[in-house]
Image (cartoon, rainbow, N blue to C red):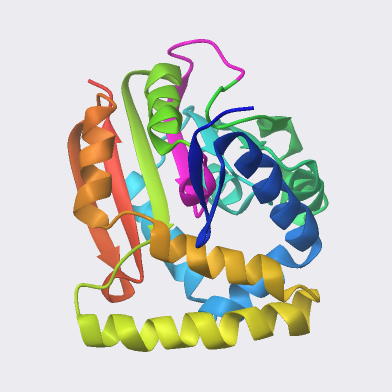
Amino acid sequence: MSDKTTHFGFKTVPEDQKAGMVHGVFTNVASKYDVMNDAMSMGIHRVWKDAMMDWLAPRPGQRLLDVAGGTGDISFRFLRRAPGANATVLDMTESMLVAGRQRADAEQMADRLSWVTGDAMALPFPDNMFDVYTISFGIRNVTRIPDALSEAYRVLRPGGRLMVLEFSQMPNPGLQWLYDRYSFNVIPKMGQLIANDSDSYQYLVESIRKFPDQESFARMIGEAGFDQVKYRNLSMGIAALHSGWKL
């Protein structure tokens, strides 16, 4: 057993136990994950994902790797905009992938989609394989974020692009305080009501607060080897998009 520790929400846990705990959270919420996303964000997560696609500008024939891709939201959007493109959805939680495969979009795009169970820190793919790597609301759940970014760099071909959509920090302290009140008081109750699981949503709220701010995360992306690292705030910084290129 490792002596190293990491955080699971606000708790400190042995590093080698976090992945299993995160797996438990997403196994519990898989069947209600999309419904909860709509409820928690009042549907705004859809606008954020569309903004991600606008900046990404998918091109025909590209190969996408969507890590922590869960129920396929990003891959479906990508494929709709890029004729002849292919998408691989990778997630550590089989039940999330099962929920994704049951969606109508998955059937319509079946010949361009593959679903893989795997770990963001040890991707089961060769070097230089993908044109685009996306991860949405997933990187904050990874045990060692630098390892996941290194793996993203490895599997992208030269000229490939990384894009991360993640909850972030609001630059205005007053607005951040209000948002925290909402997050900690409302979201776990909503989780109980909709998914019969307040604990998982308590963890998800805590994990947002533990995630680095926009500038710190941009530095981490640069340290993994990416160039032209930029970010854009969404909804005043409740979420942010980070982009980097493997040049």
* Picture quadrant of residue 194: bottom right
Count the numbered circles shown. Answer: 0
Judge left or right: residue 107 versus residue 181.
right
Residue at (30, 48) in percent of width and height = 242
The image shows residue 234 at horizontal and vertical percentages of 31, 68
Which residue of the protein is positioned furthest toward the front in this rendering? 3
Judge left or right: residue 206 versus residue 25.
left
In what quadrant of the picture does the N terminus appear? top right
Judge left or right: residue 227 versus residue 96.
left
The image shows residue 99 at horizontal and vertical percentages of 79, 53
Foreground pick, 138 / 58: 138
The image shows residue 103 at horizontal and vertical percentages of 78, 55
Can see residue 81? no
Which residues are drawn in magenta? 124-143
Residue 138 against residue 48 in the figure, above or below: above
Residue at (66, 73) in percent of width and height = 36
Q: Is residue 140 magenta?
A: yes
Q: Is residue 29 magenta?
A: no
Residue 160 against residue 233 in the figure, above or below: above
Residue at (65, 49) in percent of width and height = 22
Foreground pick, 139 / 234: 139
Residue at (22, 81) in percent of width and height = 173
Can see residue 38? yes
